[in-house]
Image (tube, grey):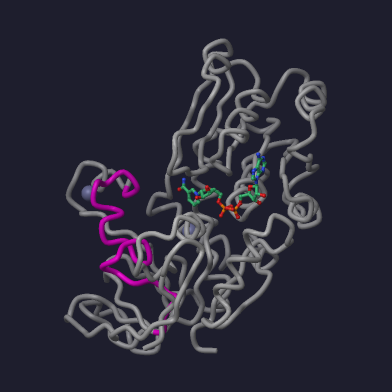
Amino acid sequence: MKAVVIKGVKEFEIKEISEPVSDGKKVIIDVLKTGICGSDIHYWVGGAPVGLVMGHEFVGRVVDCGDRSDLKVGDRVTALPISPCGKCEACRNGDVQFCPHTWEEAVGLSLNNPGGLTKRIAVRSDMVIKVPDGVADEEMAMVEPMAVGLHAAHLGRIAVGDDVLIIGGGIIGLASAMFAKKEGAQYVALTETNEARGEKSVSLGVADEWFNATSEEIVPKLMEKTGGGFDVVIECVGNSAAVNSALSMVKPGGIVVLVGVSNEAVPTYTVMAVMKELVLQGAIAYTYNEFNSVINLIANKKIDVMKFVDDIVPLEDVQNAYERLTSGTDSAIKILVDPTK
Ligand SMILES: NC(=O)c1ccc[n+]([C@@H]2O[C@H](COP(=O)([O-])OP(=O)(O)OC[C@H]3O[C@@H](n4cnc5c(N)ncnc54)[C@H](O)[C@@H]3O)[C@@H](O)[C@H]2O)c1
Ligand SMILES: [Zn+2]
Ligand SMILES: [Zn+2]
């Protein structure tokens, strides 16, 4: 079957790979939609690991139920793409994101487990979740990034009336902004270097205002506006400029949630954290419960995730979709891939 595979720096190739076969345990799924994630972009930019088939945000139809007696062929499902051991203390506490085995065999994030940029995938049966009736495939492909935003908002310990700043208006920043509002923030500002994305954060109704991150006046302006800084800043970029602006604009004693990922060292003025006695809070993925909460929020129409979907493309157009998402000027936030097209 056809798969989109990392070939080199910013380069994919379309290759034939073998179809997964039933082992009586894993669930085999025909992929209907898979999302392109900011984390996938890091792998593509770095060109490694060669041979990786990405796509950890997916929805599909069951073709083999594995050891899940509650499923039937044809059911629509999604899954947590991770591989927690289920036995360690973190797993027992429901904090699957801390398990040392969580990323080892993650679908679409490890070489031994191809993701949704192909037609058929095998997924650990205990991670598979049935799609509730009335929920569209596209909505289900959005659950994973939304769960990252929910986790970040939870870890920001946002209180009713707080001022919250989001650095970066990719899907993770927009999801964090949306949930910051739901948690009770009275003012949500967002900074971006891409004007089209900044404007979108406001037109989609998740941020109250956006500011150009390249403007020199941004720090004094926002310090004045908030009377001395934001209660919580959620950093959703991962580079040095973004982390330092988070440290600059949070108020003394405030919380900076670090969600952005970098494979390199990120030079940071730690003195700002020292002088302001900041809480630096890392955030990785989501808990099992948060993933399910997002599904319930979508099924019960409490959040609208379709507004974030810009385009749906076939496997042949994945290279072009990645180029759009990294152009720095395109307004597209989330592009889904449909391997059946
Ligand atoms: N911690 C986690 O569990 C987790 C999960 C998913 C993604 N991530 C990471 O979160 C980050 C965001 O993910 P995404 O999918 O939204 O990525 P994305 O690339 O779509 O969005 C990042 C945005 O940041 C903007 N930006 C760049 N420099 C900036 C600056 N100095 N100030 C403000 N904005 C700036 C870019 O224009 C872009 O729109 C990535 O680093 C990704 O790897 C972390
Ligand atoms: Zn993702
Ligand atoms: Zn574990």
Q: Is residue 98 magenta?
A: yes
Quadrant where the N terminus is found in the figure: bottom left
Residue 178 shown left or right of residue 21 in the figure: right
Image coordinates of residue 191 in percent, x first then y, are: 72, 40
Q: Residue furthest top?
A: 275
Q: Is residue 93 visible?
A: yes
Q: Is residue 178 above or below residue 302?
A: above
Image coordinates of residue 88 in percent, x first then y, are: 19, 45
Image coordinates of residue 168 in percent, x first then y, are: 65, 45
Q: Find residue 302 and report its image quarter.
A: bottom right
Quadrant where the C terminus is found in the figure: bottom right
Q: Find residue 335 and report its image quarter.
A: bottom right
Residue depicted at x 55% and y 75%: 318
Q: Is residue 135 visible?
A: no
* Magenta segment: 96-119
Q: Is 220 or 308 nearer to us in this picture?
A: 220
Q: Is residue 45 above or below residue 97?
A: below
Image coordinates of residue 66 in percent, x first then y, are: 23, 80
